Amino acid sequence: MKPSQPPHIAVLLVNLGTPDEPTPPAVRRFLKQFLSDPRVIEIPQFLWAIILNVFVLPSRPKRVAQAYASVWEGDSPIRKILKQQVDMLQTRLIGSVEPFTVSVHAAMTYGNPAIPDVMDKLSREGVEHFVILPLFPQYSATSGGAVYDAVSKWTLKQRNLPSYSIVKDYFAHPLYIKALADSIQRYQAKHGKPDKLMFSFHGIPQPYADKGDPYPRRCKCTAAQVAQMLGLKEDDWIISFQSRFGKQEWVKPYTDVILSEWAQAGVGSVQVVSPAFSADCLETLEELAIENRDTFIKAGGQQYGYIPALNSDEGHIELMAALTQPLLEGWVKTLDGWV
């Protein structure tokens, strides 16, 4: 005998996370959780615990809180945008696998709303299958891998386990490449074409790549495909990596170094897009749009433009629907007898 109600399916859109407010205590809590994850910092934990608690957390939160305050408008940008993405995808998925109910929810790897809390709540409400979409287009153990970890740790505490599907990444999905190319073309239709286009991705330490993290190769694939769709010549664009932390070597070339070199070599205008970010956040709105602009202008550059992340762009939501819909339909097909 089948239940009286069809199973409930939930889609989780997951991004990295954010402090709850732009204050040093809130930033300290967020940074402690984020930087305590061995996926993020791969050095012996006892040694890193000393460095983190003695040198990083006493000083860094105040400076980071000031940066957050400069981009904070009622809430963190990344959380506001994630909520918009959830609402828009929910509209797209209504009635997509009738008679089953599909709901879309926001979750964060670090901070709130936390992945375990969201999954706890939805499980109590009767969700029997999760489709989890980490909004990291290019998989890295430091980002997408941490989502897998959070979900796996949550399942260890469950007696009645739901089923779930996770999208690893989508760095070469045609709709993703098209959405990026369209966003660049729209920006250039308004602001003109630059001398150089920079694809700036969040970096990872070089030793992580040496150990097999596929992230840098995926970034290069994304940038090359977008450049090809835009019809760019090899000398028109470059891929670079931003947001270094600590003293070890990170994957190169570095965004700020390239911008300085370009300006000193006479490059007058630059536009920068950051395809690794599915939503604008501190690293794009403050680091890319402000800090790196200052780097370029002070080195002799004349015009600098930051092309916003895909955020709640219609093409971006279409991509999310294309990534989640087949997984929803695939699970529904296992419930032979309902439809």
Image: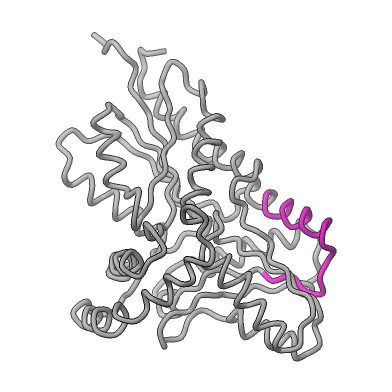
Q: Which image quadrant: the C terminus?
A: top left
Foreground pick, 168 / 108: 108
Q: Position of residue 94 (x, y in %)?
A: 51, 24
Rendering coords of residue 33 (x, y %)? 29, 65
* Residue drawn where x is 76% and y is 83% of the image: 301
Viewed as shown, does residue 312 lie left or right of 243? right
Q: Residue at x 75, y 86 (%)?
A: 263
Residue at image location 59% in from the left, 50% down from the top: 311
- What secondary structure is the magenta-colored segment mainly? helix
Residue 2, x across and y down, in percent:
27, 11
Q: Is residue 222 above or below residue 48?
A: above
Q: Quadrant of residue 212?
A: bottom left
**104 drawn magenta:** no
The answer to whether residue 38 of the structure is visible from this angle is no
- Tally the numbered discs: 0
- 183 in magenta: yes
Residue 283 x, y percent position in the rendering: 53, 68
**Nearest to the observer: residue 33 or residue 37:** 33
Query: What residue span does the magenta drawing correspond to?
Result: 179-198
Would you say 157 lies left or right of 287 here? Answer: left
Task: Judge by depth and name the residue closer to the eye, 95 or 30.
Answer: 30
